[in-house]
Amino acid sequence: MEEKCTLNNLPLDKSAIVNSVDCKENLINRVFDLGIIKDSIITPIYRSPFGDPTAYLIKNAIVALRNKDCQKITVTPL
């Protein structure tokens, strides 16, 4: 198994398991509502031309997250 990294450093089309979410309270509820919780699988599928935001596939839904928010999410690549 690979080392842990933050979600914003995960390469495109590389799935990972969410280890922890360390966001402020105003953002953590949104992140949890999107299905980004501990032990869920997430895959970055598209980066905008300027690199921010990135679209992620999570539980058969596509969500866009900014890099500054992804820095607070720790994942383990599969």
Image (tube, rainbow, N blue to C red):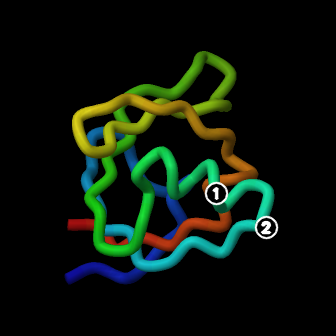
Q: Secondary structure at mark 2?
A: loop
Which image quarter holds the N terminus? bottom left
Residue 63 placement (x, y as % from top left): 47, 32
**Whether residue 7 is situated above or below residue 49 in the rendered picture:** below
Q: Label 1 amino acid?
A: Asn
Which image quarter holds the C terminus? bottom left
Residue at point 38% right, 41% down? 44
Residues at circles 1 and 2 in contact by the CB criterion of under 8 Å: no
The residue carrying pointer 1 sits among few (fewer than 14), some (14 to 19) or many (20 or more) residues within 10 Å by Cα, namely: few
Lower position in the chain sequence, tag 1 or tag 2: 2
Q: Residue furthest top?
A: 49
Q: Nearer the viewer, residue 45 or 37?
A: 37
Q: Nearer the viewer, residue 29 or 48?
A: 29
Residue 25 placement (x, y as % from top left): 77, 66
The residue carrying pointer 2 sits among few (fewer than 14), some (14 to 19) or many (20 or more) residues within 10 Å by Cα, namely: few
Q: What mark, if any, has residue 6 been given in the picture?
A: none
Q: Nearer the viewer, residue 59 or 69?
A: 59
Q: CA distance from mark 1 to mark 2?
A: 9 Å
Q: Secondary structure at mark 1?
A: helix
In this rendering, position of residue 1 left or right of residue 77: left
Residue at point 79% right, 57% down? 26
Q: Nearer the viewer, residue 56 or 30?
A: 30
Q: Quadrant of residue 62?
A: top left
In this rendering, position of residue 13 left or right of residue 19: left
Q: Label 2 amino acid?
A: Lys
Give the residue number, with chain letter if any, for mark 1.
29
Give the residue number, with chain letter if any, for mark 2.
24
Residue at point 57% right, 53% down? 31
